[in-house]
Image (cartoon, rainbow, N blue to C red):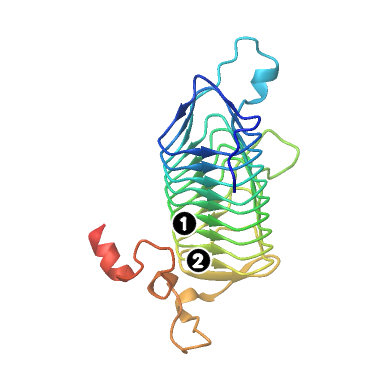
Amino acid sequence: MKFNNRNVFISPNATIGKNVKIGDNTTIYDNVSIGDNSIIANDCIIGEPSNDYYFNAAYLNPPTKIGANALIRSHAIIYADCTIGDNFQTGHRITIREKSVFGDNCRVGTSSDIQGHCLFGHHCWLHSNVFIAQKSRVGNFVFIYPYVVFTDDPTPPSNICNGPTIGDYSQIAACSILLPGVTIGKHCLVGAASIVGKDVADYQLVLGNPAKPIKDVREIKSRETGEAHYPWPYRFDRGMPWQGKGFENWEKEQ
């Protein structure tokens, strides 16, 4: 990819770190800071003003922070007042609305939409076409697979906004829908195409419409080895901080 400096706007009130590359047709608004060694690809908007900008002459863009080593692919829009940790990566055409917070080492897949006021821990991986409703809370090491939808209004339309909460190490499989306010515990697995309307305890596999508890995830066996597959951190380490050392050893270091 060539960075030709064509039609690039960087606010004089933005702070750009060392060795940052910015693609063509990209806009960096006021009060944005971008960490060292980051790549912002073509046609991106970082620090997009909130709705007040269009109606309030005294509007001031709140701070937006992108950590170091980010890779933000083309046509991404990240609104003002977001805080994003180091090593962040996106697919194409993603939107992250205002007041969203991401920890380190998170990924947001192509065509995903984060509706703002959301909180994500570290090492969250969102695949393509994921929709996250406002005021959702997601823990650490959570995988959210394609076409998952988080909802936030229990009786639409209303003034209530209460997104789901997901515990550490849980996985939400493809095409699932989480209804407003549900809490998914730690190390859970929501099966594909499930609709979850009730809280899920730790270590549970739930499946169906409506989703119902099926078994403890620690009872699930690997088809390849016949051994227990969950909790998955003991069996999977690609891209994880315990890669090459094992989850148990990594946990002892924390």
Q: Cβ–Cβ below 8 Å for labels 1 and 2?
A: yes
211, 120: nearer the viewer: 120
Q: Residue at x 46, y 68 (%)?
A: 203
What secondary structure is found at the residue carrying circle 1?
Answer: loop
Residue 242's place in the image compared with 37, above or below, is: below
134, 162: nearer the viewer: 134
Residue 170's place in the image compared with 231, above or below, is: above
Q: Position of residue 217 (x, y in %)?
A: 49, 74
Residue 246's place in the image compared with 24, above or below, is: below
Q: Residue 4 sits in which quadrant?
A: top right
Q: Position of residue 173 (x, y in %)?
A: 61, 66
| Res. 167 mark | 1
N-terminal of the pair, mark 1 or mark 2, is: 1
What secondary structure is found at the residue carrying circle 2?
Answer: loop
Q: Position of residue 220 (x, y in %)?
A: 50, 81
**Which amino acid type corresponds to the residue marked 2 in the rendered image?**
Cys
Q: Residue 54 sits in which quadrant?
A: top right
Q: What residue is pinned by disc 2? A: 188
Q: Residue at x 67, y 42 (%)?
A: 75
Separation (CA) of disc 1 from disc 2:
8 Å
Q: Quadrant of the C terminus?
A: bottom left
Q: Position of residue 129 (x, y in %)?
A: 68, 54
**Which amino acid type corresponds to the residue marked 1 in the rendered image?**
Gly
> Mark 2 packing: few (<14 Cα in 10 Å), some, or many (20+)?
many
Residue at the right extreme, as displayed? 157
Residue at the top extreme, as displayed? 57
| Res. 245 mark | none
> Mark 1 packing: few (<14 Cα in 10 Å), some, or many (20+)?
many
236, 157: nearer the viewer: 236
Q: How many marks?
A: 2
Q: Residue at x 65, y 61 (%)?
A: 146
